[in-house]
Image (cartoon, helix red, strand yellow):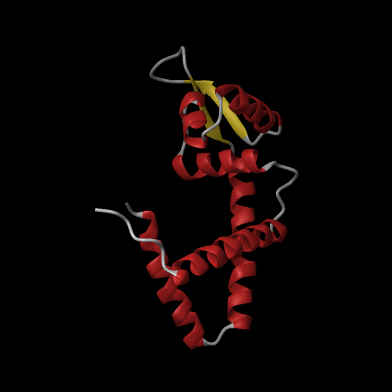
Amino acid sequence: MPRTAPTPQALRAAGELRSLVGRLRRRFLEASDNQGLTPSQTSLLNRLVKHGPSSPGALAAAERVRPQSLGATLAVLTERGLVRRAPDPHDGRRLVVSVSESGRALVTGRREAGDEWLTRALDEALTPDQLETVLDALALLDGLEEP
C-alpha cells in the first residue's frame, strides 16, 4: 500500500520540533559545566552512567563510532580520571570500561544543573494550564520512539 505524503501540519511540527530540540540542547549545555569535554566524550560518559560497565567494542557499536575513535575518547576520559579500564572478570583477555566516582559526579552535576534551569524556566514562563498542555504533548511525543 503506497504511503501518503505528510500533511503540512506534520511537516511544520517536525521542523519546529527539530529546531526547538536543538535550541534546548544548546541551552542545557550552557547551563551545565562540561569541563572541556567534547560531545562524544560526554555521550560516552553518559552511556556508562546509564547502562553500566561495558567492553570497548560494545561501546563503539552503541555510540556508532569506529573502535579507533572510541580508543581516543577513552584515553582522554581515562587520563582525566573519569573512567576506569580493568580486565573482564569473566575473560581476562578483554577489558571492561566503567565510570569512576568523579565521572559519575560530573554527569550527575551536569544533569542537575540542566534540570534546575529547565524547571525554573517552565515555572516562570508557563501557567499551570500551559504546563498540563506541555505534559500532554510530551506524552504524545514519547510514543514516537516506539516502532
Give the left or right position of residue 134, taking residue 110 as reference.
Answer: left
Give how far across and how far down residue 5 sits, in percent: 39, 61
- 82 w.r.t. 4: above or below: above
Location of residue 80 (image quadrant): top right
Give how far across and how far down residue 18 sits, in percent: 56, 60
Is residue 87 or residue 125 the one in the foreground? 125
- 65 w.r.t. 5: above or below: above
Residue shown at the point (45%, 20%) measured from the top left: 88
Q: How many marks?
A: 0
Give how far across and how far down residue 70 sits, in percent: 59, 28
Location of residue 71 (image quadrant): top right
| Residue 41 visible in the displayed image | yes
Residue shown at the point (64%, 38%) measured from the top left: 41
Residue shown at the point (47%, 35%) measured from the top left: 62
Looking at the image, the residue that sits furthest to the top is 93
Looking at the image, the residue that sits furthest to the left is 1
Residue shown at the point (72%, 59%) measured from the top left: 30
Is residue 53 or residue 42 the one in the foreground? 42
| Residue 102 visible in the displayed image | no
Give how far across and how far down residue 84 sits, in percent: 58, 29
- 106 w.r.t. 75: above or below: below
